[in-house]
Image (cartoon, rainbow, N blue to C red):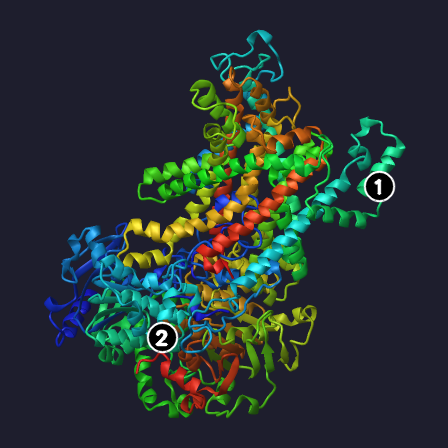
Amino acid sequence: MSDPGRTGHPDHGAEPAAGPAAPEGAASGAARPSGVGHRLRRARPGTWFLSACGLVILLCAAVPWLIAPGDPLAIAPRESFRAPGWGHPFGTDESGRDLFTRVVHGTRSSVLIGVLSTLLGVGLGAVLGLITGLGRRWVDAAGSRLIDAMLAFPTLLLALLLIAVRGPGVATVIVAVGLSSAPGYARLLRSEVRRVSRTGHVEAARMLGKGPLTIVWRHILPGALGPLLAVATLGVGQAIVWASALGYLGLGAPPPEPEWGAMLNAGRTYISNGWWMTVFPGLAIVGVGVVATLAGRRLSARWAGRGGAR
Amino acid sequence: MSSETAGAAGTAGTPGRPVAGASVVSARGLRVAFDGVQVVRGIDLSIAPGTCLALVGESGSGKSVTARALVGLTGGSVAADELTVAGADALSLSERAWRSVRGRRVGTVLQDALGSLDPLRPVGREVADAARLAGIPLDLPALLRSVGLDPAAAARRPDELSGGMRQRALIAAALAADPELVIADEPTTALDTTRQAVVLSLLRARVDAGGALLFITHDLAAARRVADEVAIMDAGRIVERGPVAEVLAAPASAEGRRLVASVPWERPRCERLLPDAGGSGSAAASRGGGGGDAGGAGTAGTRPGGAAGVVRATGGRGAGPGEAPGGDPTRATRVGVVVPSLEAAGGTPVLELDRVSIRHRGAEAPTVVGASLRLERGRTLGLVGESGSGKSTLLRAAAGLVPLEAGEVRLGGEAWSALPERRRRKRRRELAMIVQDPLGSFEPRWSVGTILTDALGRRDARAVEELLESVHLPAGVAGAHPRTLSGGQRQRVAIARALAVRPAVLLCDEPVSALDASVQARVLDLLDELQEERGLAILLVSHDLGVIRHASDELAVLDGGTIVESGATEAVLASPRHPFTRELIEAAPRLR
Amino acid sequence: MHDDARPAPGPTSRGVPGAVAVPGAAAPGAADTVTVGSGTAGAGTAGAGKVGSGTAGAGEGPGEVPASASPLAAAGRPGAGAPLPRGRRRAWWVSALWRLLGAVVAIWLVATLGFAVLQALPGDPAEAALGGPGSQASAAALQAAREQFGLDLPLPQQYLNYLGNLLRGDFGISYGQKRPVVEVIAPLLWPTLLLALCSLAVAWVLALLTAVIATGRSRVAARLASALELVASVLPGFWLAAVLVIVFSTQLRWFPAVSDNSARGLVLPTLALAIPLAGYLAQGMREGMLSALDAPFAAAARTRGETPRGLRWRHALRHGLVPGINLSGWAFGYLISGAVVVETVFARPGLGRALLTAVTARDVPLVLGVTLVSALGYVLVTLLADALVALVDRRAAA
């Protein structure tokens, strides 16, 4: 229903250029300069900082030896339990391994676990969300109930259940964290698909005589996937936290492996005499989490601004 | 130049009015700037008790900012030679002092009836807020009754009330602390015309009871109903002011003439509302100036004919000065033909709705019951009704977007609604639709060029250019994103997209109701022009009888899902049979 | 519609990044499409469409039903002015019944998923019941066990038996402890619930405080509050617990490193769980409050002479509560998950620790039992949260 009543008069528009408020004929300025250079110049300092942090994380994951040239597994019993200092900025663990090296080298497996489980969750969620979002009413009703039921399993409990069935290990952790995040993504995608399906531009596409496949591919998916992408970025941080929790419980990567969760698990025993073993790997998790969350928020805001939220 | 006009008009309007000392509000040289950009550029105002000043102007003219300056809520920097509000020197008021002015001395009614009440609080609390904050005892039931609300509404949440009731509640909220001045900022824009009439008379009653009212509107017709004096604003200045009747009868300023010319009621069917803009879209940029003069001349020309009354209008149409492009054969047949009812009209209709009933899934009552319409080539059928009457639903049913419960829609004499969607899809391009919110109907990631290319179904820069040209947009718009365009331009792009499929039928769902009066006039003119060029059949849905009257050959009045009356537009308007039609006519926005 | 029609913020998607951050944060069935966020709901047709779809999941989505007569409509014509694109408002008990039905269905599905997990177990369940592959049970003993647990019955029959057992509160027998799962869980339930409830309460207080400061007039304080809230929300609970132990137990010796049910013992684990949760809640509340402060009704309230403080407490706070409550259903699951690790850090007796032992021993019936109980808890808490939201925001009730 397009009621005149819903409209209101454009006089209260916040930006004069963006509303019907602007006088007709302002078209001359309409062609907004675009292009990468322009976008870079417009980027806020926050974006720069965020990109820099992302780059550091990426470097740590891809080429850790550039940043920490040592061997993360090399033991030096005489050097054990060194507090953070010049030689060992993050200290050493019970076998004298340098914690800084281990934290840097742990980036790859921790981030990989987070990314892989998010991908799995997004993939599963996308299938479920698309089926419920695009399907007929009864499909939607059934699918939505299923999503609700899956949401009822607390993340870690679902993971533990899976580990109880399949035994511990990195693969299980990835599957478990992915599975437990899937219903959230499914639900988001479902509501996004439904929202986009109802928008005027999808109706306009129907009026142009386009078929359902074209409409889904050209209009609904591009509109619905943006918000999903943003949330998935946030989700990577969450996945890393949950995966490290499982590692902390000793259910993830086996001990000598430089993985943040496993390192925290090792630090557990020496909590009273080696605080650095607990603090630094955790800080790494927090750092990655903050970067992922900020990036996700940026993406969210951007999609909202793009008319994704209309 | 224009400031001198303003000054002159100001002094001309003042005689007969109480002097500034007795005014509730008085401003001299009021200026408001945001980030160094002056939005209000030195205006004078004064309102005496028992009078209403209407501040009229289009979006961006600075009228709302002026209103907010009077309650200290602009958010920008306010300067003035003198600014007295309810006896206080507003220029020296602290924020705390302002709070005791707001609500207590100056009540404000805002435009957005849905948004202006907190959805999580009972309406009664919102209404009583001003009195509570001012520490004044309040008889809430009496207040609610005085604006025509059931006192039981106090316990309701805003979304449980209709739009008209919410607007009344807002008026009650503004009156709660019995302020000397009421500022009503576009209070009726969100309402149906019949509701508008009620709200306007409520406001007028306040004035007659001795209150002062500042009425902000873009709608001259609304100003006519409420105000004693009108001030026309353009680009931050008051360009004309005077008693309402005088200004509307003979606007002296270009902006005034343009506004008057833009009111479609009583303007003959084929006449361009703003002839100056008809030729080129870029001329739209020339606000006021010579263009406005041309418009004014057109108005002056029609006035005698219009004054002769509605009865003559059907026959008199051919005599209108707008008949200049009269060589068109479709035009010729149209002029002077009196069609007693839609059913009796001859020829094969392009689009035909046969006793259509629509019921939304899960709804108890059908939205539309037994509606029949026929639409012929080169003609416009207006569908008028209030929100919720089912007019948009009916239009969407004609588009094949809504399943029917009963009846049939035929397109070009062949089955349409009866077809399965798969087969209907192939014929979709015979129809095109324009909606109220063009921006929402564009894929958000696409530029204008992409949108048009997509609609054309082929990559053809030349065709895109031609489409833009046909709606009087410069070719450069193709690279722009719709978000960066103005409302009128967006609607032109929507029309261009509709033309891309070379439709036989154009379905228009409130195409101009979100636009400023003059922009609305230009879009209506464009539709008229395209219809002449291409012989389009247009189904025009609007809540505004003025738009319908100006733009359609036949009309159907929809009330509560039923077509209560239909026929040739002027014939129906000259002798309405149904009480609802009469009510609509009574409430229609007009200047006389 | 217009550009000035803000997208109606809802707790589900873009409106609240905090909520988005949490996959599946919104309450099931309820917050999905009903716009709860702010007063700008339906400021445009797009927004209106959103509101309209209501409870599609419950099989009742009214879609685009035009407004029917409001009970008070003086003029009698339906939906005068700007009607809400919503069907006849259902009686509260009808929608409550639908919610209840939805919850029952969800619980049934949860149980069914549990059954699927049992079926997916590698190896012979009868053997597992007798002590696992290493038990060297005789063929006769295995057969007896099969008959005892009904494992020789056809699958549908087993499924019905399983559901029947669950209804009677029989969650099977723990492999590890050789006792009914219920007996193992029951005494551990209270310590964990106590921890969860304390954490939820503390998280709410912290979140409200942060949200109120973050929406306040002091820009520095607001920035600080937002930053705190961001960092808090990504803190891993178990790591925070460990850090708290290092600081307050081993260094300052204010609180014990081993937790019991005493007030002193509860402080550290409660904080470890509550701080990250508060981060999430605060995000939701802050967004809700900010969108309320931006909404036209806030401007309208100011024209009535409302003070900034009044604006925040009388108007914005309610709008902040709604997303907060909506998140609380999810928070329950989060707390139970968190309890598992935090209880381990503090060597605290509870469901979490029992669960961890069971997982290490691969005691599937016990793990499944705990999981089912917490899923049931989640569904109930969500139902409660929905009811609470409906109290604050009547639009969500229908």
Residue ID at (68%, 31%)? C359
Answer yes or no: is residue A271 visible.
yes
Q: Is residue C179 left or right of residue B454?
A: right
Residue ID at (62%, 72%)? B403
- Under circle 2, the secondary element is helix
Tag 1 subunit: C
Residue ID at (47%, 32%)? C271
**How far across and how far down the image is residue B12, in percent?**
15, 74
Do marks 1 and 2 both belong to one polypeptide chain?
Answer: no
**How far across and how far down the image is residue C316, in percent?**
37, 51
Q: Residues within 10 Å of mark 1 (few under 14, many from 20)?
A: few
Q: Looking at the picture, which amino acid does disc 2 mark? A: Gln
Name the residue beneath numbered marker 1. Answer: C147
Front of the two marks 1 and 2: 1
Is C227 situated above or below B450?
Answer: above
Answer yes or no: is residue A105 visible.
no
**How far across and how far down the image is residue A182, in percent?**
63, 44
- What label sits on residue B196 in the rendered view? 2
Tag 2 subunit: B
Which quadrant: the N terminus of chain B? bottom left
Q: CA distance from mark 1 to mark 2?
A: 79 Å
